[in-house]
Image (spheres, grey):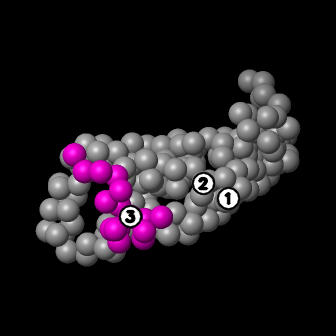
């Protein structure tokens, strides 16, 4: 769930950068459409991404030691599942933003940032899934390698 939230926020940010390439126009549109919370959302998404990556790495390492650690932290979620969660989160964000400034959510149907934002969810979900799988695999291989590493023989203590 955290991965989907972070992905939806990332796609949302990319969307607005593309649709409103000039900062002044983007800032004006964001202010007019209920995005006052955006800095907090971006910070929360960054924290969520770090937590997800840490959980995936810990799960991969635990699996190498033959243990199960709370699933694979989202690394086993298929792209389709991540995509569905991201789309729901994105649509909910956009509709709530408009509602906060007194606009009907139906205005989104006529806005390019809504349609591009929906389209961007797929490549972001695909990239996120690839990244999670890679982190899981690397953590698993590193932990497995460390577990197989032979211990160095200990020298007997010298007597004086």
Percent x, y for residue 74?
66, 46
Q: Is residue 107 magenta?
A: yes
Mark 1 secondary-structure assignment? helix
Find residue 110 and name its label.
none
Q: Quadrant of the N terminus?
A: top right
Judge whether residue 42 can be spotted in this image: no
Q: Foreground mark, 1 or 3?
A: 3
Residue 42 point in image, percent of width and height: 35, 50
Q: Which residue is mark 3?
A: 109
Query: Which residue shows up at 25% across the image and 75% down it?
Result: 21
Front residue of 89/9: it is 89
- Does the magenta stretch mainly form a helix, a strand or a loop? helix
**Could you tell me which secondary element the residue under label 2 belongs to?**
helix
Q: Which residues are magenta?
A: 102-118
Residue 152 on image: x %, y %: 81, 43
Which quadrant holds the C terminus? top right
Q: Is 131 in front, or is 27?
A: 27
Number of numbered tags placed on the structure image: 3
Could you tell whether 86 is left or right of 96 in the image?
Answer: right
Q: Is residue 59 left or right of residue 12?
A: right
Q: Mark 2 highlights which residue? A: 84
- Read off the residue under disc 1: 80
């Amino acid at each position: 769930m955290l991965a989907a939230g972070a992905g939806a926020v990332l796609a949302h940010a990319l969307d607005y950068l593309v649709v409103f390439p000039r900062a002044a126009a983007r800032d004006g549109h964001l202010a007019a459409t209920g995005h006052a919370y955006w800095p907090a959302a971006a910070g929360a998404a960054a924290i969520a991404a770090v937590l997800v990556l840490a959980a995936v790495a810990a799960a991969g390492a635990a699996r190498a030691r033959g243990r199960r650690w709370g699933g694979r932290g989202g690394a086993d979620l298929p792209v389709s599942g991540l995509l569905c969660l991201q789309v729901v989160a994105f649509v909910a964000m956009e509709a709530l933003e408009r509602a906060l400034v007194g606009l009907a959510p139906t205005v989104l149907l006529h806005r390019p940032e809504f349609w591009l934002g929906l389209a961007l969810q797929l490549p972001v979900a695909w990239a996120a899934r690839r990244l999670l799988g890679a982190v899981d695999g690397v953590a698993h291989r590193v932990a497995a390698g460390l577990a197989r590493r032979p211990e160095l023989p200990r020298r007997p203590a010298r007597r004086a």
